[in-house]
Image (tube, helix red, strand yellow):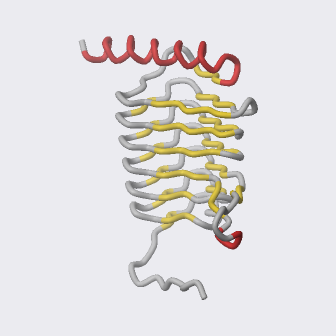
Amino acid sequence: MEIYFRAIISLFINLKNKIFFQGRYKANILQSFGPGFRVHMSGKDSKIEIGKKTVTRAGMQLRVEGGTLKIGNQCFFNTNMNITCVDEVTIGDYCQFANNIVIVDHDHDYKQGINPGLVSSPIHIGNNVWVGANAVILRGVTIGDNSVIAAGSVVRKDVPANTVLYQKREDNYKSFQ
């Protein structure tokens, strides 16, 4: 019974987004969106495309401010997933994301002082990528097909295809001077 209820709720969420955002939101009508699925778009150039058979759990937030977000077919997003896009974020087919993941294609230009502007670069995530819990994927990163990003990783450089990325606890950090 719950699966039918969730399908009906997802249908209404999808229809609402298609009507509200008109041609800027494209998704197959039958998806499985969990509770708290939210889409925020600002700027007339903002676009979201979601492939077929995408499944989300509770608390997924998609925020697009003038950029383009493309999610491939048959992707799975666990709880508390947050994607923020001002430039471009592309996710391939058959990707799986654990809980509490942040993907953001921009950051603040702290060198500008009190009112920093944004610096952005596209993010591309290949096909069949698995991302572990509490990972953060930063601007300008390309993750190749069939790669695994370990839980708690901060991805700030490209990851080649067929790679397992993990970070040691003793990684050194550089202070700002």
Is residue 148 or residue 49 the one in the foreground?
A: 49
Q: Quadrant of the C terminus?
A: bottom right
Is residue 90 or residue 84 the one in the foreground?
A: 84
Q: Is residue 78 above or below residue 105?
A: above
In the displayed image of the protein, which residue is found farthest to the left? Answer: 1
Report whether 23 appears left or right of 73.
right
Q: Quadrant of residue 80?
A: top left
Is residue 105 or residue 20 the one in the foreground?
A: 20
Q: Is residue 61 above or below residue 33?
A: below
Q: Is residue 46 above or below residue 163?
A: above
> What residue lies at 56% left-to-right and 24% top-to-bottom?
52
Q: Is residue 72 above or below residue 143?
A: above
Report whether 99 appears left or right of 165.
left
Q: Position of residue 53 (x, y in %)?
A: 50, 24
> What residue lies at 53% left-to-right and 49% top-to-bottom?
129
Q: Position of residue 158 (x, y in %)?
A: 65, 64
Q: Position of residue 2 (x, y in %)?
A: 26, 17
Q: Quadrant of the N terminus?
A: top left
Q: Position of residue 59 (x, y in %)?
A: 38, 37
> What residue lies at 50% left-to-right and 35% top-to-bottom?
75
> What residue lies at 50% left-to-right and 64% top-to-bottom?
164
Q: How many marks?
A: 0
